[in-house]
Amino acid sequence: MALEFKVNEPLLPEQLAEVFRLSGLKRPYNDLERMGKMLDQADVLISCWDGGRVVGVARAITDYCYCCYLSDLAVIKEYQKRNIGKNLVQLLQETLGDQVAIVLLSSEEALSFYPQIGLEQVNNAFRIARKR
């Protein structure tokens, strides 16, 4: 079966949690209430499906005219290296248009991945880390 990409397709908290858990991305996947809030508060949700199973997710917050924060990009490990992450980001770009910049924070493990899919590394970002 061919993989299918969807824009703003509703997901259950359990589906998002499974993608995070099986991708290796550090997220609070055991807290389904928090997963639900993460879904409810996202402005754009791009998902990749293999039949009825969600295998990849790009979750973003945006003003739709200038800036978008790509808060999550996760693909289940067994589906990685199939250009799913790249396709999720490309579909996010298409959905937002050319006037919107996309920014993200990378884990150390993914630093080499993002330049491969066209993102430019910058050194002028700052943050206040979450406490939990």
Image: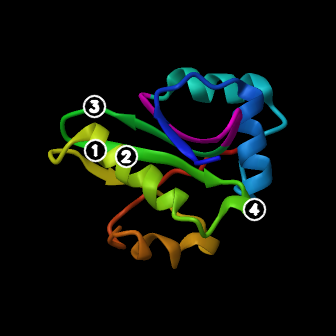
Q: Left or right: 22 with respect to 25?
A: right
Disc 2 on helix, strand or loop?
helix
With 81 as the anchor, is 64 left or right in this view? left
The C terminus - image quarter: top right
Residue 66 in percent (x, y) is at: 19, 41
Dot 4 lies on which element?
Answer: helix
Contact (Cβ within 8 Å) of mark 3 with mark 1:
no
Q: Nearer the viewer, residue 130 or 21?
A: 21
Percent of width and height locating residue 9: 52, 25
Q: Residues within 10 Å of mark 4 (few under 14, many from 20)?
A: few
Q: Label 2 belongs to which residue?
A: 91
Look at 40% across and 75% down and name the residue there: 115
Mark 2 is on which residue type? Answer: Leu
Query: How far apart are the alpha carbons under marks 1 and 4?
Result: 26 Å
Mark positioned earlier in the residue sequence (3 or 1):
3
* CA neighbours of label 3 inside 10 A, class few (<14), some (14 to 19), many (20+): few
Contact, mark 1 vs mark 4 (Cβ under 8 Å): no
Q: Amino acid at mark 3?
A: Asp
The amino acid type of the residue labelled 4 equals Glu
Pointers 1 and 2 in contact (C-beta within 8 Å)? yes
Q: Secondary structure at mark 1?
A: helix
**Is 47 colored magenta in this rendering?**
yes
Confirm whether residue 132 shows in the render: no
Q: Residue at x 64, y 73 (%)?
A: 109
Q: Range of the magenta residues?
A: 43-54
In the rendered image, the residue lying farthest to the front is 1
Whether the magenta-drawn stretch holds residue 50 is answered as: yes
Which residue is the site of mark 4?
Answer: 78
Amino acid type of disc 1? Glu
Q: Which residue is mark 1?
A: 94
